[in-house]
Amino acid sequence: MRDPRHDILFTPVQVGPLTVKNRFWQVPHCSGMGYRYPNAEARMRGIKAEGGWGVISTQEAEIHPTSDISPANEARLWSVEDVPALRAMTDAVHEHGALAAIQLVHNGLHSANRYSRMIPLGPSPAVYDGNDPVQARAMDKSDIADMRRWYREAALRARDAGFDIVYVYAGHDMSVLQHFLSRRHNHRSDEYGGTFENRLRLFREVIGDVRDAIGDRCALAVRLAVDELLGPEGITCEGEGHDIIAALAEVPDIWDVNLSGWPNDSQTSRFAPEGFQEPYIGFVKSVTTKPVVGVGRYTSPDSMVRVIRQGIMDFIGAARPSIADPFLPVKIAEGRLQDIRECIGCNICTSGDNTSVPMRCTQNPTVGEEWRRGWHPERIAPLESPTQVLVVGGGPAGLEAARALAARGAEVTLAEAGGEWGGRVSRESRLPGLATWGRVRDWRLLQLQDRPNVQMYLHSPMGADEVLAMGLPHVVLATGARWRADGVGRWHRLPPGDLGKVLTPDDLMSGASLPEGPVVIFDDDCYYMGGLMAEIAIKAGAEVTLVTPDSMVGSFTQNTLEQGRIQTRLLEMGVRIVTAHRLEGRKGNVLEVACTYTGRIMRLDCATLISVTARLPEQDLWQALKARRADWVDAGLRSVTRIGDCLAPGTIAAANYAGHLYAQDFGSVSATIPFRREDVAQLFTM
Ligand code: ADP
Ligand code: SF4
């Protein structure tokens, strides 16, 4: 039964000509599926509609080939040929009674047009905002007329594709309309530049054009970045962000407001708590009578009720919470709060889109696999013949394998050597800023705890004798990995010489204290761990140098939108950063590192070296069981399978996925290509 305090989340709200059935609004978010994988895109969005969201939006939909952000895989609405792919999505959304929204975009100087090879367009001559040697040309009056026509025509195509809500978008610094609004980008001296009213002109005109095109069948949404976190150089919520809303207050049917650019809008839990946008967007409802939607990684229904009651917004906008749990609204509606798979705010999802592949999620292993593998976040097929499985290791891989196998009806025994569940998730969630990551463990434990077909044992280190003595037919090894201490990683494929005593992240996570004196961290992992070790060391009072062969700290975190914040934090804490250097050797308390280009040596004072390079799979049990292969039949043992970090160390998302995959595939014969492909199914015309 639903908690009556949450009833307000299920009251319908009028948006222009439409009624949205509840307050749950999946705002536009990229998925990495886009125009190249339209079946995958449609199925993923349809499942969210099934999960109770009132509105389901596309990702940004490019309206013209001069707005081509290849190789990113967003939605496309360049011409009528793009309509059927989007129609598949609107049909999937409508099937479950939700409304479908599309975010039209012309990317302006944000698109390098790598595929179309057309010249990018902007308000003024400007370099493309990535590092391609490409410049946008300034639009003249006929370009402006074209732009308005492209928006109008795209809006008509959107209507024909079955969309109920059409967005005009000026956010994330990714839209020509924001580029015209911005003093930073718009240096024009005609009636489209200079004064506030002039810079607003194109935005106002396009909103009017789109409204004329869609008529009264569709609602018109305007998405605006009310603050760019750039101070006076950018749009601010006290300055022009406020003024834009005030100038156009009653024009759209709904305001969708957020922060720009994307790393500000989708901040990770390491840097921002739930509701972090409220101080910026809180003013909007005082300036307009139209409904407002915003985001802030809300997963708690109590917080959602609060922001509505406090008049901050009318709809709970969500991208990441809807990825981690597509059924979040249904679970609140049914009072099943313990079943909510809360987003942990890690941005592995954005890393999929940023590397132009279907998104993945640390919490929800089914995302991106809905169409190609037929996975569903809430349903899993029962086993044809129930069986018994021993899972060894209670980290993310073991917990998810146990959970999903149990959901399929297997009799599951889960054995963990240590005194707590969660493996690396528990250890890493105690690192600075990562407490929320514990949700990966907590959700699985809650799902496991009341299952009669699951036995769970802590303090149970398993050797080959113990495994064979249990006499269970199937064994899953999820025994994890440990950080290596020899410096081997991406740069050093062989040990780089005598490094003396080296600490690893495992040592620090196990509570090892740092000896007195300067600390050097050698980070060749290129993700979050090196930076976190530096934070810990500097908080312990050490003088800290972080050395990396890379050109920046944690370069993979560019994909999780955190790199800038991580490097800024370390610099502000006083960490010295040495890039493009590898290990050379160590003599006492002097560490020699060498420039990766010139080989020139630099000497660093180093009482403690912390190596963050790579991990080694924990395979002792695997080796022991292999050595006892001859005993398997007598013990009734039929299969032993390694999953997660003990097979190949990777992300927590990958471990969780491995656990889920094992359970999904259990009892089936694996195909050469284990999923459906849609890119080869298209017709070729020569
Ligand atoms: P993954 O990310 O693959 O789930 P983790 O390192 O998070 O891996 O978790 C592995 C877990 O397996 C750890 O909690 C560890 O204590 C446990 N483990 C390792 N070897 C054994 C063993 N022989 N018996 C029981 N548990 C084990
Ligand atoms: Fe949330 Fe991480 Fe999943 Fe993204 S990948 S939805 S941030 S849990």
Image (cartoon, rainbow, N blue to C red):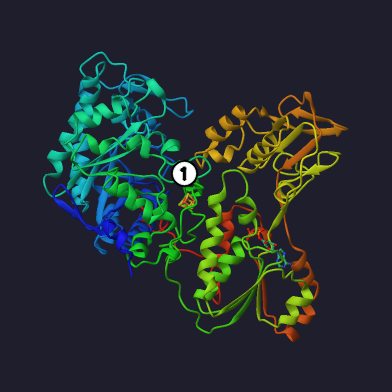
Q: Locate residue 421 relative to residue 50 in the image: left or right.
A: right
Q: x%, y% of residue 613?
A: 71, 43
Q: Locate residue 144 relative to residue 443 in the image: left or right.
A: left
Residue that extends furthest to the bottom in the rendered view of this protein: 634
Q: Locate residue 433 relative to residue 240 in the image: left or right.
A: right
Depth order, front residue of 164/342: 342
Does the rendering let one see residue 673? no
Look at mark 1 in the image and give the residue it sits on.
273
Residue that extends furthest to the right in the rendered view of this protein: 588
Q: x%, y% of residue 514?
A: 77, 40
Q: x%, y% of residue 24?
A: 30, 54
Quick one: label 1, few (<14), some, or many (20+) residues within 10 Å? some
Depth order, front residue of 54/152: 54
Q: x%, y% of residue 49?
A: 31, 60
| Quarter of the figure with the N terminus | bottom left
Vertical order, 598 against 426 (above or below):
above
SS at circle 1: loop
Residue that extends furthest to the top in the rendered view of this protein: 189
Vertical order, 244 against 267 (above or below):
above
Does the rendering let one see residue 510? yes
Vertical order, 81 against 380 (above or below):
above
The residue depicted at 56 percent of the width and 60 percent of the height is 441
Ligand 2 within 8 angstroms of badge 1 C-beta: no
Q: Quadrant of residue 97?
A: bottom left
Q: Amino acid at mark 1?
A: Pro
